[in-house]
Image (cartoon, helix red, strand yellow):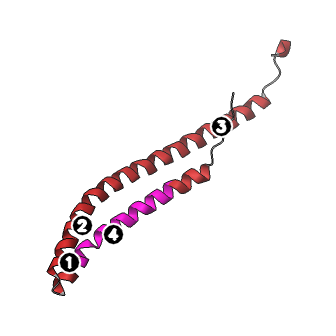
């Protein structure tokens, strides 16, 4: 049997970084209309139109990014929770087993 070693902190950090990246994408998306309106107010209609086009396409991609990132972060958290649960169960079983009286016949 091989040993399984899992860096729980690395998984947790990875999930946090994924959530942070998703939040940044949402932040950028939220600033699109502000930039577009500033360009329009400054008389830069071509720039405003270009930004509108960019943010329409960004919105589509950011939606997928956000969904995928959220699912990945949730999956990592499920892995962490499951590994901790199994680790706790195994520790408890080992502790319970060490308290069991010796069986007759060496068993």
Q: Which residue is mark 3?
A: 4
Instruction: Find numbered disc 3 in the image and state the secondary structure of the residue it sits on.
Output: loop
Q: Indicate the position of residue 87 as horizontal and vertical percent values.
A: 64, 39
Instruction: Answer with mark 4 or mark 1, whichever residue precedes in sequence.
Output: 4
- Give the residue at x 44% y 58%: 19
Choose top left, top right, bottom left or bottom right for residue 28: bottom left
- Alpha carbons under labels 4 and 1: distance apart: 17 Å
Q: Residue furthest front?
A: 46
Circle nearer the viewer, 4 or 1:
1
Instruction: Answer with mark 4 or mark 2, whichever residue precedes in sequence.
Output: 4
Circle nearer the viewer, 1 or 2:
1
**Quarter of the N terminus within the rendering:** top right
- Looking at the rendering, the stretch of residues picked out in magenta corresponds to 15-35
Apparent side of residue 105 relative to residue 85 in the rendered image (left or right): right
Q: Which residue is mark 1?
A: 47
Q: Indicate the position of residue 52 as horizontal and vertical percent values.
A: 19, 70
Circle nearer the viewer, 2 or 3:
2
- Alpha carbons under labels 2 and 3: distance apart: 45 Å
Instruction: Find numbered disc 4 in the image and state the secondary structure of the residue it sits on.
Output: helix
Is 71 in front, or is 93? Answer: 71
Q: Which residue is mark 4?
A: 28
């Amino acid at each position: 049997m091989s040993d399984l070693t899992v860096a729980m902190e690395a998984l947790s950090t990875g999930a946090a970084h994924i959530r942070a990246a998703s939040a940044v994408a949402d932040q950028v998306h939220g600033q699109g209309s502000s930039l577009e309106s500033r360009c329009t107010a400054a008389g830069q209609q071509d720039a405003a139109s270009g930004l509108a086009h960019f943010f329409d396409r960004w919105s589509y991609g950011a939606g997928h990014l956000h969904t995928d990132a959220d699912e990945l972060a949730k999956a990592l958290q499920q892995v962490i929770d499951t590994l901790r649960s199994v680790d706790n169960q195994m520790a408890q079983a080992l502790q319970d087993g060490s308290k069991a009286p010796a069986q007759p016949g060496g068993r």
